[in-house]
Amino acid sequence: MRDPHFDKLPFQVRATPKIIIENDWNTNAYITFLLAIDTGLDVLGLVGSTANSWSRQASLHALALLEIGNLSCIPVHKGADYPLLNSADLARTWETLHGQLPYQGVFKPFNATAEASGRDSSSGDPNRISRPAFLEGFPNSTLTGEHSAAWMVEQVRKHPGEVIVYSGGSLTNIALATRLDP
């Protein structure tokens, strides 16, 4: 059944509304895509972003959550490894000048104890995976090979006026997609 809220969207929806969901996925992030599905949206895919954890770790969480829900038909695309403007060096320089950053995200110092107890990976290596953080279980499937920004542009072009892009993450992938095709 179609949700009546979609009749009030600022653009004309000709078919089932489609959505791309970008997030820094973790064990508890399943509600975002389940709500989209329950609302009647056609989920084109999920994109992992770097924010609280690295995009590879976040994307693998998304894969694992989809597997649990028997929703592996939804593709997961790994987003950009690094933010456009920030870096670990810049964060440390900021702290030297102004004091400790209240939110450090992936740039917080490595903490082996925290990772062993189930926290997502942080510090300098975007490819390091913290397996204890996968309380939902490590995924059996693999990420798609396409770059997320290019894939998002492709989907918006393929379905003009029908795609909603939702970000619960850092917006880096959306910024890159916008740079590719404003």
Image (spheres, rainbow, N blue to C red):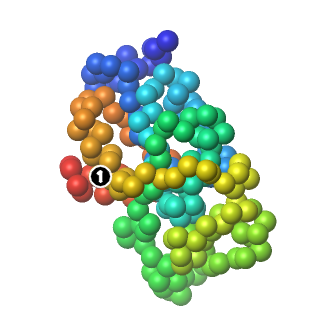
144 or 155: nearer the viewer: 144
Q: Which residue is mark 1?
A: 150
User: Given the current orientation, which residue lies at the most extreme top position?
Assistant: 1
> Label 1's element?
helix
| Location of residue 113 in the rendering, given as x and y in whole percent from the top left corner | 77, 74
Q: Is residue 113 left or right of residue 169?
A: right
Identified by mark 1, the residue type is: Ala
Q: Is residue 158 left or right of residue 54?
A: left
**Which residue does the image show at 52% across and 23% down from the upper left?**
39
Which corner quadrant of the image does residue 114 belong to? Answer: bottom right
Is the residue marked by circle 1 packed among few (<14), some (14-19), or many (20+) residues within 10 Å?
A: some
Which corner quadrant of the image does residue 173 belong to? Answer: bottom left
**Which residue does the image show at 61% across and 41% down from the upper left?**
67
**Which residue does the image show at 39% across and 55% down from the upper left?**
145
Q: Is residue 127 left or right of residue 110?
A: left
Q: State whether residue 121 is above or below residue 138.
A: below
